[in-house]
Amino acid sequence: MNEQPGKYKVKDLSLAKAGKMRIEWAESRMPVLMALKEKYRKSKPLKGFKIAGCLHVTKETAVLVNTFVEAGADVSWSGCNPLSTQDDVAAALAADGVSIFAWHGMNVQEFYWCIEETLKFKPNLTLDDGADLIFTVHNKHKELIPTVIGGTEETTTGVHRLRAMAKGGALQYPVIAVNDAETKWDFDNVYGTGQSTLDGILRSTSVLMAGKNVVVAGFGHCGRGVALRAKGLGANVIVTEVKPTAALKATLEGFRVMTMEEAAKIGDIFITATGVKDVIIERHFKMMKDGAIVCNTGHYDCEINIGDLAKLKKNVREVRADNEEYTLKDGRRIYLLAKGRLVNLAAAEGHPSEVMDMSFANQFMSQLRLAELHKKGQRLDNKVYDIPVEQDQEIATVKLRTMGYSIDRLTKEQLKYMDDYSAGT
């Protein structure tokens, strides 16, 4: 472990060269964020602002961090998941002078220690993936709240928690729900999660997906993306749901819909994507066939009740990287991937750079929006806000342009027609 107290703590600084190469690759695939980096490099609109970030330390995140730095911000960073940090990327950021506290394989105490370290420089902006940083500020460092302008939240689980917090009157500064942007939700969550989840499963198992019964718990944006990609690889996809409209959507997409009780008996691979705890519990494990593979792609490791699985085991061993074989007392074997944490980040590299380009452009522009409001002496109320529709469309426009596509525009007559309520048959 390499550490400079108050500045960084990473696994191994000697990995920095490899990390920089990975970051350069991500930059070549993230043209929107790179355009923002170039646009604000000279004007430095974030000069004087301190951003504390708690987000998966991947090569894509590094591009976002470097964009903040180029725009003038002071940054201190931690990882938002104990198993998602890419140690070479963390080393590269530390070597470039970024304050960062993150390494792969940390325990829960170390995880929160890293968050605490990022708060020592007294940030006035926060950036979250899962809201652990915001909760730490609210629960343990209330003295920082008066100087925090606002924050942003990256993921579905975090937004849900923060909206509940705001509804209860407990949120003490405004937060922009980056997750709910169309250019995040409908792309990162669907296509990013779908591809990276299957990537994590294949890296940790090397199984053939074609012909397998793949059970996807949850048919929100993430679950839908997983189901689509599994179907594309030839799997027989089964969806479990608690929301009638979501179950109906899955049915009309061509997927089988049933309860987890029914699915547990026939599933070969189980993937949870709900954001809710105890989706797979003891009675489900008891029904599973020998050789069943279980993993999670929701933000927290509570969707699969690992304690229940442990109660049934005779012994456990790691048979491959990120793949633990639980031999049960009756002789059946169940394989748990990535210790029940995000399989797409713990066992693979997370979402492709191309899709994170839009998500992180939203992060950058939302942080910039909070800073610009502060400069004007304005402040949002202590609520959770969606990003402006114009921002969504601007990012999508730039993304299309970088991909070589152009689209039509409405004429003046068409615009007039759209607002003409007297027009009829």
Image: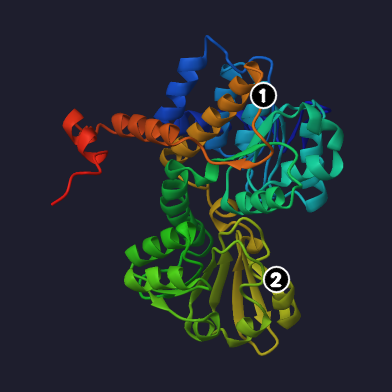
Kindly identify which numbered label has been placed on residue 306.
Answer: 2
Q: Nearer the viewer, mark 1 or mark 2?
A: 2
Please say which color scheme the image uses. Answer: rainbow
Residue 303 rendering spot, x and y as whole percentages: 64, 67
Identified by mark 2, the residue type is: Ile
| Mark 1–mark 2 distance (CA, rounded to whole Å) | 37 Å
Could you tell me which quadrant the N terminus lies in? top right
Residue 65 rendering spot, x and y as whole percentages: 59, 28
Instruction: Tell me what residue is drawn at x 20 percent, y 28 percent.
Output: 412
Q: Is residue 221 visible?
A: yes
Q: Is residue 40 left or right of residue 124?
A: left
Secondary structure at badge 1 equals helix
Total of numbered circles in the picture?
2
Q: Which residue is mark 1?
A: 95
Residue 90 rendering spot, x and y as whole percentages: 65, 34
Instruction: Tell me what residue is drawn at x 56 percent, y 59 percent.
Output: 297
Q: Looking at the picture, tell me which residue is in the foreground, 351 or 88.
A: 351
Q: Looking at the picture, tell me which residue is in the foreground, 49 or 376.
A: 376
Residue 264's quadrant in the figure? bottom right
Is 231 placed above or below 142 here?
Answer: below
Residue furthest toward the left? 425
Instruction: Tell me what residue is drawn at x 46 percent, y 22 percent.
Output: 36
Q: Residues within 10 Å of mark 1 (few under 14, many from 20)?
A: some
